[in-house]
């Protein structure tokens, strides 16, 4: 009779039945080396055969910061109450925002971009968007260093609360992961979504406190602002960097709970769709 | 112990997946039109592969071979049924799969191994072995986009086979490497098999399938029509091929018939060169032959005196082909142009098998055709030879040559020893690799197919004494 040895190397590719979630997590953990080598590949290949290398990851946000400063501070005269120069304020927000906007877009397209890999090699597919998100951290860190230098010029120095920053980043990664798990699947089946998401991210930027301070929002909206994860993160990020203030922990905790609860349906959706990736790509 | 098991596996592809637009969807739903673009890549496959087995998957293009491999590896999932895998798999599917063209060979080894799920530590241990096997010591720090396709294949093969996977899956990628690397690969695969690894591979090279595999899976239109002895599987596969060929030929035949009906006697000619002047049944007349093949791989020796104009092979029905059923007769038509005056020319055909063993060789002189005494410059020599092929199914190559004999030798032929004849013969031209012939099993009698290289004529008797 046929006997199998279930264990590390055994996996059952049966039809229809959802593979157990913990099996997925264990497999993901077993393949963590792949996650890191794909992240490394993404970072390396981004600057392959470019002359200015990582200069490009700085060029766009710096230009944006200058343009927004001219538009919102010099022309529209948006007030910043806490005595932060507008240029630094907007660059600080853009540091966090650019990471969200660019990695969401690239993670959404990552499955399609790596179709050659997916149609020929078997591995847990979520590693691809995940590694794209992690590789975006490289650009984020460069921007962050520039931010710290810029702030030092106007008298804001690193403080002890910078230790909270990894928490902020982890929450942001979880947020991007949730979104891109769903969007990457949709973008395989229908590429229309790429056209739509670009605009939605732009709209989202205008309702989040990127150009204006959180305090400019009406008090009623401020109370339920944890429903906007990026808004809450931006506010916390700014408080830590400039004001050496505690982030609003209640709102942050609410965001974490919401994101973790949402993670499971997103992940299950992705894992179910994963089975037909090769056939649709 | 079983390494891999397919349970009633069916895979259906939606050929139009993701191609519906808003407008076509509207049309299909409102017009109640059913789309019918589903393709059954494999149907109801039940296979068990034991540990340590080498299994070759053969079949025609589109038979579902690659789909079967992808199902085994877990790249794609079955529509119905299940696939069970017991052990780790290293797959080599498609050339350069998992390579990043901008990375160097060294970086790609690590990337590729991590894609196969191999810990970095083990790759570091095996690194020099992999590089040595791929013969890429000088190019290991070069981006792989500068590699030739052979180097890609070598590196891919070296990685997949050196990471200690229990099951090795290889799609038709070895064909890219040169013959020496292929030989090395097959030797290495054999050594892996001795270590108890399981091997699953797709190949169109029936010779290597027959030599390496313990069993063969023959797929036809997604159905597993045979699983078992490699020799028989290969023979059945070649038969499939032949059925397709004859189907094509029957179309041609209609055309041929309409042509010959206008000149119904054309097929029966008198061979003038024949001493007895006996009537011979020729499939084609020289005037009917439209073109001669000049194989690009042909190696010509002696182009000074003679110019080779090509060869054409016909079967007994007069259609051009190079695939013959066992025991069939083939007609070789070949032509030379003489560049200087020569004496008593004669020509020959030799058949070699895959290993380079001379199976058969005969000259026109041995067929009893007496050549003219002298042939003037710019004359054309046309040769027709028929050969019966009671050979085992395989691919054979043939060589052609043209020689001439000294007049004295020719006159005293009856009285000379073989050595003396040899001394009086000069080879004018020799064409090696002039072409190839495929011998397929005889569809009428599959039982006589397993006899060795040649079916030697003979007879037998069996009596039982009480």
Image (tube, grey):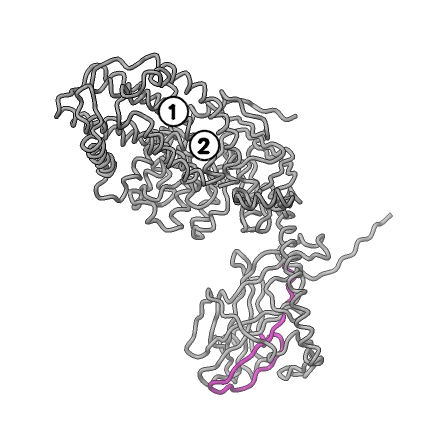
Q: Is residue B260 above or below residue A46?
A: below
Q: B294 or A232: nearer the eye?
A: A232
Q: B284 or B454: nearer the eye?
A: B284
Label 2: which secondary element = loop
Q: Residue B226 in the image: state x and y as whole percent.
A: 66, 44
- The secondary structure that dominates the magenta segment is loop
Alpha carbon distance from label 1 to label 2: 18 Å
Residue B4 lies within the magenta run: no
Q: B358 or A42: nearer the eye?
A: A42
Q: Which segment did they paint magenta?
A: B364-391
Q: At 64% across and 69% down in the image, what residue appears?
A: B319
Q: At 32% across and 19% down in the image, what residue appears?
A: A218
Q: Closer to the observer: label 1 or label 2?
A: 1
Left or right of B453? Residue A23 is left
Dot 2 alpha-carbon crowd within 10 angstroms: few under 14, some 14 to 19, many 20 or more = some
Q: Which residue is mark 2?
A: A125
Left or right of B418? Residue A235 is left
């Amino acid at each position: 009779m046929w006997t199998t040895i279930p264990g590390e190397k055994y996996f059952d590719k049966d039809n229809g039945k959802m593979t157990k979630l913990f099996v997925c997590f264990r497999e993901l953990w077993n393949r963590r080396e792949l996650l890191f080598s794909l992240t490394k590949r993404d970072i390396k290949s981004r600057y392959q055969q470019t002359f200015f290398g990582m200069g490009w990851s700085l060029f766009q946000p710096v230009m944006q910061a200058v343009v927004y400063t001219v538009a919102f501070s010099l022309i529209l005269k948006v007030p910043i109450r806490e005595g932060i120069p507008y240029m630094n304020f907007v660059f600080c927000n853009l540091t966090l925002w650019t990471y969200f906007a660019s990695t969401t877009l690239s993670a959404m397209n990552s499955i399609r971009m790596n179709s050659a890999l997916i149609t020929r090699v078997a591995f847990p597919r979520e590693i691809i968007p995940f590694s794209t998100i992690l590789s975006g951290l490289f650009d984020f860190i460069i921007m962050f260093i520039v931010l710290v230098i810029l702030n030092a010029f106007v008298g804001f120095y690193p403080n002890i609360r910078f230790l909270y920053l990894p928490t902020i980043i982890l929450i942001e990664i979880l947020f991007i992961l949730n979104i891109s798990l769903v969007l990457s699947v949709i973008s395989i089946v229908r590429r229309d979504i790429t056209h739509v998401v670009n605009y939605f991210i732009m709209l989202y930027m205008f309702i989040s406190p990127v150009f204006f301070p959180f305090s400019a929002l009406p008090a009623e909206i401020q109370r339920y602002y944890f429903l906007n994860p990026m808004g809450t993160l931006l506010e916390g990020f700014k408080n830590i960097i400039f004001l050496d203030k505690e982030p609003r922990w209640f709102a942050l905790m609410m965001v974490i709970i919401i994101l973790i609860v949402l993670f499971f349906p997103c992940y299950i959706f992705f894992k179910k769709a994963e089975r037909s990736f090769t056939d649709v790509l | 112990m079983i390494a891999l098991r397919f349970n009633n596996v069916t895979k259906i592809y939606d050929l139009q997946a993701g191609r519906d637009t808003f407008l076509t969807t509207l049309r299909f739903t409102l017009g109640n039109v059913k789309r019918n673009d589903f393709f059954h890549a494999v149907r109801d496959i039940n296979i068990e592969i034991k540990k340590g087995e080498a299994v070759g998957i053969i079949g025609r293009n589109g038979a579902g071979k690659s789909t079967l491999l992808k199902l085994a590896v877990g790249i794609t999932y079955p529509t119905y049924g299940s696939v069970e895998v017991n052990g780790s798999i290293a797959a080599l599917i498609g050339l350069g799969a998992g390579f990043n063209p901008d990375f160097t060979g060294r970086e790609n080894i690590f990337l590729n191994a991590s894609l196969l799920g191999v810990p970095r530590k083990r790759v570091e241990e095996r690194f020099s072995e992999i590089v040595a096997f791929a013969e890429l010591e000088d190019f290991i720090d070069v981006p792989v986009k500068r590699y030739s396709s052979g180097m890609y294949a070598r590196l891919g093969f070296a990685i997949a086979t050196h990471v200690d996977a229990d099951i090795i899956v290889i799609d038709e990628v070895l064909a890219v490497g040169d013959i020496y690397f292929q030989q090395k690969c097959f030797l290495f695969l054999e050594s892996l098999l001795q270590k108890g690894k399981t091997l699953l591979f797709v190949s169109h090279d029936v010779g290597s399938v027959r030599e390496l595999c313990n069993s063969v899976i023959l797929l036809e239109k997604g159905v597993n029509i045979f699983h078992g002895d490699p020799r028989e599987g290969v023979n059945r596969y070649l038969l499939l091929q032949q059925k397709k060929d004859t189907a094509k030929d029957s179309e041609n035949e209609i055309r041929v018939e309409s042509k010959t009906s206008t000149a119904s006697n054309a097929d029966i000619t008198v061979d003038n060169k024949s001493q007895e002047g006996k009537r011979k049944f020729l499939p084609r007349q020289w005037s009917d032959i439209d073109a001669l093949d000049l194989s690009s791989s042909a190696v010509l020796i002696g182009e000074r005196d003679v110019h080779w104009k090509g060869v054409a092979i016909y079967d007994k029905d007069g259609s051009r082909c190079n695939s013959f059923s066992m025991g069939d007769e083939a007609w070789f038509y070949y032509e030379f142009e003489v560049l200087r005056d020569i004496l008593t020319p004669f020509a020959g055909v030799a058949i070699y098998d895959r290993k380079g063993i001379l199976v058969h060789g005969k000259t026109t002189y041995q067929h009893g055709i007496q050549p003219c005494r002298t042939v003037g410059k710019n004359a054309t020599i046309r040769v027709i030879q028929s050969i019966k092929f009671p050979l085992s199914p395989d691919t054979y190559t043939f060589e052609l040559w043209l020689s001439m004999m000294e007049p004295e030798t020719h006159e005293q032929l009856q009285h000379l020893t073989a050595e003396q004849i040899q001394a009086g013969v000069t080879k004018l031209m020799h064409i090696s690799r002039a072409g190839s012939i495929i011998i397929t099993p005889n569809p009428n009698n599959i039982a006589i197919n397993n006899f060795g290289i040649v079916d030697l004529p003979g007879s037998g008797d069996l009596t039982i004494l009480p």
